[in-house]
Image (cartoon, rainbow, N blue to C red):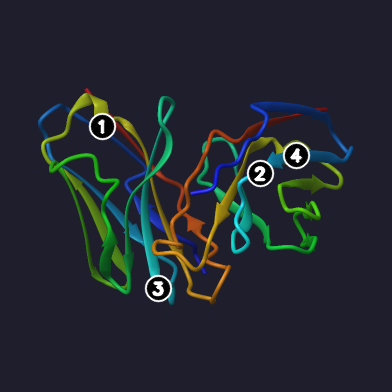
Amino acid sequence: DAGVIQSPRHEVTEMGQEVTLRCKPISGHDYLFWYRQTMMRGLELLIYFNNNVPIDDSGMPEDRFSAKMPNASFSTLKIQPSEPRDSAVYFCASSPNRGVGSYEQYFGPGTRLTVT
Amino acid sequence: DAKTTQPNSMESNEEEPVHLPCNHSTISGTDYIHWYRQLPSQGPEYVIHGLTSNVNNRMASLAIAEDRKSSTLILHRATLRDAAVYYCILRDPLIQGAQKLVFGQGTRLTINP
């Protein structure tokens, strides 16, 4: 398996522009997660899906952020409008449902976003 | 969520064993102990997890104290590739949102050649 695939790997955009980050989870995984990592705040969970349905979006910083999962093999995280403080590395992860105690998550390589 | 405490950084030499400690004095009876690591410029990767008994896999061993208030991740023979930030995370599979990972600051492990 190719693992979790994220695109683009790097994105540089100007403040106010719309940014769309993409993720293809590992086939057969039931859960999909979006994380953000910054030096100041570390790794934070933004939102996660189970069987394409958003379960918990309490980590989404504000209404400028939205995430969708139209099918089991694709998810997007959109920022509109983007701001310099959104600069971070965004990770997508997926997880199979193997029962109590497991829930290993497999992370993608991340998208490094720079908003100028 | 029960909290974990890890040293900010540790240093070891190549080909020597490394013991990474994690304190979790408020752990509940149903919390699993998970370890992830993040290599430079990569996403985190799963290392190992356990509940009560010590666990071994191809990457590492997890030693869990009898009272479960602490655990130790053991890398038996460190290589330069093991230089990473190691995260100790507790997860209770019986609570809502158990699938979430809550990352702390972790331990930054440096391996000297």
The residue drawn where x is 41% and y is 45% is A110
The residue drawn where x is 45% and y is 64% is B95
Alpha carbon separation for disc pair 4 and 1: 33 Å
- Chain bearing tag 3 is A
- Chain bearing tag 2 is B
Tags 2 and 1 touching, CB below 8 Å: no
State the image coordinates of residue A23 (x, y, percent, origin top left): 33, 57
Q: Which mark is residue A30?
A: 3
Q: Which mark is residue B25?
A: 2
Kind of residue indicated by mark 3: Asp
- Chain bearing tag 1 is A
State the image coordinates of residue A65 (x, y, percent, origin top left): 18, 45
Left or right: residue B110 versus residue B39 is right
Kind of residue indicated by mark 2: Ser
Above or below, A70 against B84 in this view is: below
Q: Label 4: few (<14), some or many (≥20) within 10 Å?
A: many
Nearer to us of marks 3 and 4 is: 4
Q: Which secondary structure lies at badge 2?
A: loop
Label 1 sits on residue: A86
Q: Label 3: few (<14), some or many (≥20) within 10 Å?
A: some
Above or below, A10 against B36 in this view is: above
Label 4 sits on residue: B20
